[in-house]
Amino acid sequence: MDKHYGEIIERTIRRNGYSISELARIMKVNRRSIYNWFGQAKFKADIIFKIGCALKHDFSNEFPELFSSEEFQQAFSNSKFTSTPQIVEEIEKVNYWKDKYINLLEEYNQILAMQSAGLGSRSYATY
């Protein structure tokens, strides 16, 4: 029985909790392309290898006929996506603003909930 490459890759991505959006961004393709890959029974080994490198997943277990573990380990060690202090700092900045935004949204939702409950019926024109 032949392997269905797309199903194997989809299962691996979902089982390990990888984000389709993040994978699409790293690989510079749109999400639709990735979903189309899931439906393909066969495709080129270099695409599988690129997916593995983007996710830092060794596909030699799923596709031993295509890859050796050493190929992935070498690619991971040569990866340009290794953490640097600048990347860590940028991630912290993004998380700071994301958290600030979420807090503002939560406060706004509380105000809306109070208004709909009749607790905030006074006019805001006096503020």
Image: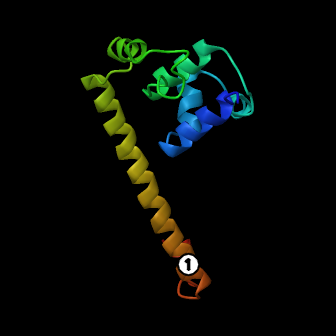
Q: Is residue 24 left or right of residue 88?
A: right
Place residue 46 in its image quadrant: top right
The residue that appears at 39% across and 52% down in the rendered structure is 99
Task: Using the image, determine if residue 75 lies above or below residue 31.
Answer: above
Kind of residue sitting beneath label 1: Ala
Q: How many numbered dots are placed on residues in this image?
A: 1
> Could you tell me residue 1's position as x and y percent?
70, 30
Q: Which residue lies furthest to the bottom in this view?
A: 118
Q: How is the image coloured?
A: rainbow
Q: Residue furthest front?
A: 1
Place residue 90 in its image quadrant: top left
Using a 10 Å C-alpha cutoff, classify the residue at mark 1 as few (fewer than 14 neighbours), some (14 to 19) or many (20 or more).
few
Task: Using the image, determine if residue 73 lies above or below residue 95.
Answer: above
The residue that appears at 51% across and 66% down in the rendered structure is 108
> Could you tell me residue 29's position as x and y percent?
64, 23
> Could you tell me residue 47's position as x and y percent?
61, 17
Task: Using the image, determine if residue 35 lies above or below residue 126.
Answer: above
Mark 1: secondary structure: helix
The residue that appears at 51% across and 20% down in the rendered structure is 64
Out of 123 and 34, give the one closest to the viewer: 34
Q: In this view, does 70 lie to the left or right of 111?
A: left
The residue that appears at 47% across and 65% down in the rendered structure is 106
Out of 47 and 104, give the one closest to the viewer: 47
Residue to which mark 1 is pinned: 113
Q: Residue furthest left?
A: 85
Out of 4 and 9, give the one closest to the viewer: 4
